[in-house]
């Protein structure tokens, strides 16, 4: 990795301002992507195990869009959902799904044997399930989860309890299936090779360099440890990807911590401070993209954002890059009720700013919002 010159020291305030621009949550020195394909490629991958959260993660970065717009783009295969890394569902660029599974999914797939042991499932049965689903979906098939269950049951494959989820994950981790957009409220599955007939297949070093560049341009400045944690790569492969990216990445120091970012963003300087307010979904890259979240949230608030430390993140209200509240929604027939729980004192003017910040979300879901406070 190069980038030129001596490593320059910056403050955490500078780093947070840059990071908000990198995350496409604040105007910066880059031209923001204008469609779903562009946003997902910018990030490389976006956490999306919760569908509604994944849709709003895209919507918040595509001003004026609606949930229908984003769903239509996914139906056009501008991006797809699968388990590319850490055994967790992400949105990824469709043509990159094959290599991401191959390069970033290695460790998750290697751990499948341990999970099968817990479930009482043999490798032979898991492989049989992959064959059954592959044959059943061939020729343009698209099955709901229940239809997958039925196909497996008819072939004599036990898929009771947690077995079905594991088998669908395993078939997807193997690069046979991927998650297609919902039909109504039903999750659907298709064959990855049929959904993406012209995959990009870079060599390993190019693949590692690509994911390193995409991560640091969309999350930077941040650390190599954050990159390794996000991708699930070994420390050696994380270093290899950063090195392979070469001049596309550079280092800065933030309060004496070495961080990595793109030289274009560094050379343009940190964006001006902004009193901006954002309403973000729980599984957004804003928090999920980092192991160290101290720039964005006070340590004492983490338990409210991740209750019980169980990996289920609450939706957040963010002011000037810092979390100030959590929120939950209840969707009704005619309106969506949003309940906001402040984590800091918010005076009446600040509460009005929060309610104003929910305007784009109301437009996105196509329903009037009622904001409730404790």
Image: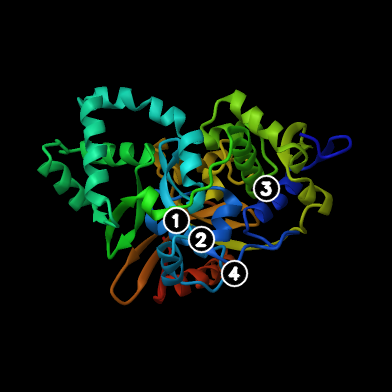
| Residue sitting at x 50%, y 65% | 59
Q: Nearer the viewer, residue 270 or 162?
A: 162
- Name the element at disc 3: helix
- Name the element at disc 4: helix
- In the picture shown, does residue 161 fall above or below 186? above
Which dot, 4 or 2, sits closer to the camera? 2
**Which residue was labeled with disc 3?**
217
Residue 56 in the image: x percent, y percent?
47, 61
Which dot, 4 or 1, sits closer to the camera? 1
Q: Do tag 1 and tag 2 residues touch (Cβ < 8 Å)?
A: yes
**Which residue was labeled with disc 2?**
58
Report the disc number at residue 307. none
Q: CA distance from mark 4 to mark 2?
A: 28 Å
Q: Is residue 243 visible?
A: yes
From the viewer's perspective, tell me whether residue 26 is left or right of residue 95: right
Residue 45 in the image: x percent, y percent?
52, 48
**Which residue was labeled with disc 1?**
54
Which mark sits nearer the N-terminus, 3 or 2? 2
- In the picture shown, does residue 235 fall above or below 201? above
Q: Quadrant of the N terminus?
A: top right
- In the picture shown, does residue 268 fall above or below 224? below
Q: Do tag 4 and tag 3 residues touch (Cβ < 8 Å)?
A: no
**Which residue was labeled with disc 4?**
349
| Residue sitting at x 47%, y 75% | 363
Q: Residues within 10 Å of mark 2 (few under 14, many from 20)?
A: many
Which mark sits nearer the N-terminus, 4 or 1? 1
Which dot, 4 or 3, sits closer to the camera? 3
């Amino acid at each position: 990795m190069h980038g030129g010159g001596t490593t320059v020291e910056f403050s955490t305030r500078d780093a947070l301002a840059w990071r908000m621009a990198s995350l496409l949550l604040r105007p910066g020195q880059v031209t923001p992507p204008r469609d779903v394909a562009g946003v997902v490629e910018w990030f490389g991958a976006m956490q999306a195990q919760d569908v509604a959260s994944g849709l709003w993660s895209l919507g918040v970065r595509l001003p004026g869009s609606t949930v229908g717009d984003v769903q239509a783009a996914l139906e056009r295969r501008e991006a797809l959902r699968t388990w590319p890394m850490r055994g967790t569902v992400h949105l990824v660029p469709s043509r990159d799904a094959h290599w991401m599974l191959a390069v970033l999914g290695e460790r998750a797939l290697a751990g499948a044997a341990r999970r099968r042991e817990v479930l009482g499932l043999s490798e032979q049965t898991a492989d049989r399930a992959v064959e059954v689903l592959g044959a059943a979906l061939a020729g343009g098939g698209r099955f709901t989860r229940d239809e997958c269950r039925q196909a497996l049951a008819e072939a004599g494959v036990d898929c009771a309890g947690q077995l079905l989820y594991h088998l669908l994950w395993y078939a997807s981790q193997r690069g046979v299936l991927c998650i297609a957009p919902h039909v109504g409220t039903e999750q659907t599955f298709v064959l990855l090779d049929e959904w993406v007939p012209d995959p990009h297949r870079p060599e390993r070093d190019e693949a590692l360099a690509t994911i390193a560049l995409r991560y640091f341009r969309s999350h930077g400045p941040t650390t190599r440890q954050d990159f390794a944690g996000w991708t699930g790569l070994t420390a050696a492969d994380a270093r290899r990807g950063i090195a392979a990216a070469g001049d596309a990445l550079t280092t800065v120091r933030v309060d004496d911590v070495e961080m990595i970012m793109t030289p274009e963003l560094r050379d343009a300087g940190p964006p001006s401070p902004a009193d901006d307010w954002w309403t973000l979904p729980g599984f957004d890259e804003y928090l999920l993209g980092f192991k160290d979240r101290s720039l964005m949230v006070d340590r004492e608030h983490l338990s409210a954002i991740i209750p019980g430390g169980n990996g289920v993140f609450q939706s957040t209200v963010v002011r000037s890059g810092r979390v100030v509240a959590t929120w939950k929604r209840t969707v009704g027939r005619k309106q969506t009720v949003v309940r906001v729980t402040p984590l800091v004192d918010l005076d009446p003017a600040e509460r009005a700013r929060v309610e104003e910040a929910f305007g784009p979300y109301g437009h996105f879901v196509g329903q009037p919002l009622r904001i409730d406070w404790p």
